[in-house]
Image: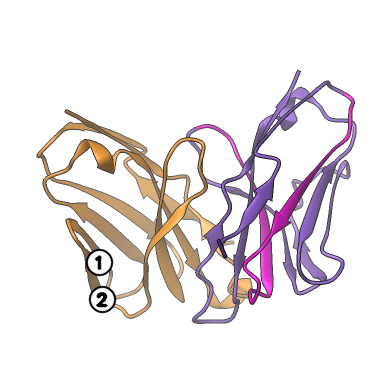
Chain colours: A orange, B purple
Amino acid sequence: TQLLEQSPQFLSIQEGENLTVYCNSSSVFSSLQWYRQEPGEGPVLLVTVVTGGEVKKLKRLTFQFGDARKDSSLHITAAQPGDTGLYLCAGTFPDSNYQLIWGAGTKLIIKP
Amino acid sequence: DTGVSQNPRHKITKRGQNVTFRCDPISEHNRLYWYRQTLGQGPEFLTYFQNEAQLEKSRLLSDRFSAERPKGSFSTLEIQRTEQGDSAMYLCASSLGGVMNTEAFFGQGTRLTVV
């Protein structure tokens, strides 16, 4: 059984600060996705990573996939209040019929 | 709008009543997922369909829950004899499936409140 652990569970920082959140598994991912969810809405896909060591950038967000494809990080530079939300990672594994397995999320609050 | 559509957005029901939610996926997506989410938590998998076939159902899912996708397009999720513990956001997502196409696109969800 694959489990995804996200850390921290909760993070509250001031506008302008940098932050990193993590997603880890004991199994090798086939692919990993990061989503952002605002209250009362469904999750919205931010990025998909597939290749070990892969780095993708989306404006102030930098996503990194570990070389062993067991972990990933999301780094936000100069956080803004609009970044507030629940950040979820979801992965697929070869023996899960490529069904998405979800982490519990990191709740991020950026204070102005 | 060609995104995932869910109806209703909100539902308030009395305990013991039955409720049914509808999900219209992105038209070319063959996979459809139902999730339940409580405040501050990630989505909890309920079930998923590949076309019209229900391929997996969570072992945590009570037999009061049933889902259908009769023509491989829209899907319904029914909860019978609702309980207060069923109060949650019910999310539907669709994807193309396969190794490289598992990106899930979500609807806005149906928020259920059982009173």
How far apart marks 1 and 2 lie (CA) works out to 6 Å
Mark 2 surroundings within 10 Å by alpha-carbon count, few (fewer than 14), some (14 through 19), many (20 or more): some
Q: Which mark is residue A64?
A: 1
The part of the chain drawn in magenta is B16-39
| Residue B38 can be seen in this image | yes
Query: Are tags 1 and 2 found on a single chain?
Result: yes
Query: Disc 1 on helix, strand or loop?
Result: strand
Q: Is residue A36 above or below residue B19?
A: below
Question: In the rendered image, which quarter is residue A71 located in?
Answer: bottom left
Residue A19 at x, y = what percent? 18, 45
- A79 or B2, which is in the foreground? B2
Residue A102 at x, y = what percent? 51, 55
The residue positioned 58% from the left and 35% from the top of the image is: B38
Amino acid residing under circle 2: Glu
Q: Which residue is mark 2?
A: A54
Q: Is residue A80 above or below residue B47?
A: above
